[in-house]
Image: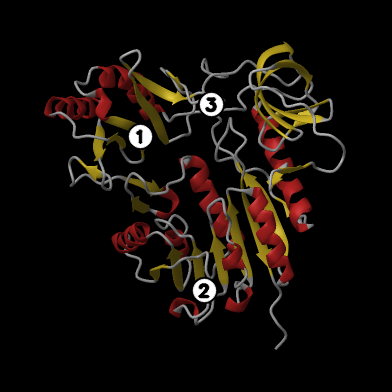
Amino acid sequence: MTRRTGGLRFQPSGGARSAPLQVGRKQVLSIERLAHDGRGIAFVDGRTWFVSGALAGERVEARVLGARNRIVDAHAERILAAGPLRRAAPCAHAGRCGGCTLQALPHAEQLALKQRTLAEQLARFAGLAPEEWAPPLVGPEFGYRRRARIAVRWDATSGRLEVGFRAAASQAIVAIDDCPVLVRPLQPILRALPALLHGLARPRALGHVELFHGNTSAILVRHTAPLADADLQRLRVFCREHAAQLWLQGRDEPRADAPEAPLDYRLEPWGLELHYRPGDFVQVNAVVNEAMVVQALEWLAPRPEERVLDLFSGLGNFALPLAQRSREVVAVEGVAPMVERGRENATRNGLNNLHFWQADLSKPLAGASWAAAGFAAVLCDPPRDGALEAVRQVGSLGAGRVLYVSCNPATLARDAAELAGQGYRLRRAGILDMFPQTAHVEAMALFEREPAAG
């Protein structure tokens, strides 16, 4: 990168800088392979092009979205010669909506890409490969998403309300009348929602709308100004017609229009029911989530006499089932409202051996009262930033087994290297296909350490 210091310009090594590429320029490219994020990779005049909407083996005309040094971000405008793997996109909005970037790739190839990504990241950043690769954990290819955020924007120029999903490579909003990845109960709500919102008296008061489905459906309306009484009544009628709860959010936290109505989902194999609120983290794919919890319990194999630690525990998605198999579970979460709802879920499900604590897990855990007695096993389900500070201290807790659930293979690999340095071996790993039709990779890894000699 060029740096400016005192008016002088420093050039990177390797010769003169190439002439800049203008945004919007068109270029014909031959795509050699796919990047980890699902974009096609091409090489022209010493530059590496990352092209959304392109597959390996294709010849495309791409439009430049941005360029820095020798890296170019681009979008495939036309497919001049389709590759052998390209299929007809199942969604009519593919290529315009920015949500499902891998629809043109068969599902088996999507899984292969995610598997390669995980393996390459573990090898590159940690120098590791698992002793055993688990088969991908999969669910339905479509109809899986139980949460969706609908973009809403008032266009002052046209004097109309735009409703839909964000476009690919743009801030534009694509009007959506059907979304194949949504669960069935939310699809009729999505189809009818634009007409409802267009008919409101004060559409400029709308921020965005979120859809949820668990044991029932729910609609959250984010508003930037008070809603007119007539508009609120229209929203209530709409929700009654679609058997959905209405939630509202102004400047404060989301609130239910009918406060007595719970919003929840079930973990059926364990007879558990978890209450949540809009804004809480809930896995979008119910089928894969349930299978993920089953696999986590099988791999971690908690025993009735053991004390288990669940880090980044959220509402208790893992902690509640773990508590049914362990002597005691300590669940630690950084977000105070989630800790409170976790405690409520434990009480509601009659689990008195499950204890929730709030702690900043980006900071050292030393001195925490809940950690003093140590743990036989640890489950860790961090956000994309990973859990480096937490895993640095896992060995000192006495845990012989660590199960790491990841939504970012790069930070999983980084943290795996830390665990390996503490004497843990990567016993097993595999991908979780939580987001079919996208390049998003979730993974599970089991680490084991031999007990110290007595």
Q: CA distance from mark 1 to mark 3?
A: 17 Å
Q: Which mark is residue 210?
A: 1
Q: Label 2: state its secondary structure.
A: loop
Q: How is the image coloured?
A: secondary structure
Q: Amino acid at mark 1?
A: Glu
The C terminus, quarter of image: bottom right
Q: Label 1: state its secondary structure.
A: strand
Upstream in sequence: badge 3 or badge 2: 3
Q: Amino acid at mark 3?
A: Gly
* Contact check, label 1 and label 3, Cβ < 8 Å: no
Q: Residue at x 43, y 30 (%)?
A: 183
Location of mark 2 (residue): 365
Q: Position of residue 309 (x, y in %)?
A: 50, 69
Q: Residues within 10 Å of mark 2 (few under 14, many from 20)?
A: some
Q: Label 3: state its secondary structure.
A: loop
Q: Which mark is residue 98?
A: 3
Q: Residue at x 47, y 57 (%)?
A: 318
Farthest residue to the right: give it.
14
Q: Position of residue 129 (x, y in %)?
A: 77, 55
Q: Amino acid at mark 2?
A: Leu
Q: Nearer the viewer, residue 449 or 312?
A: 312
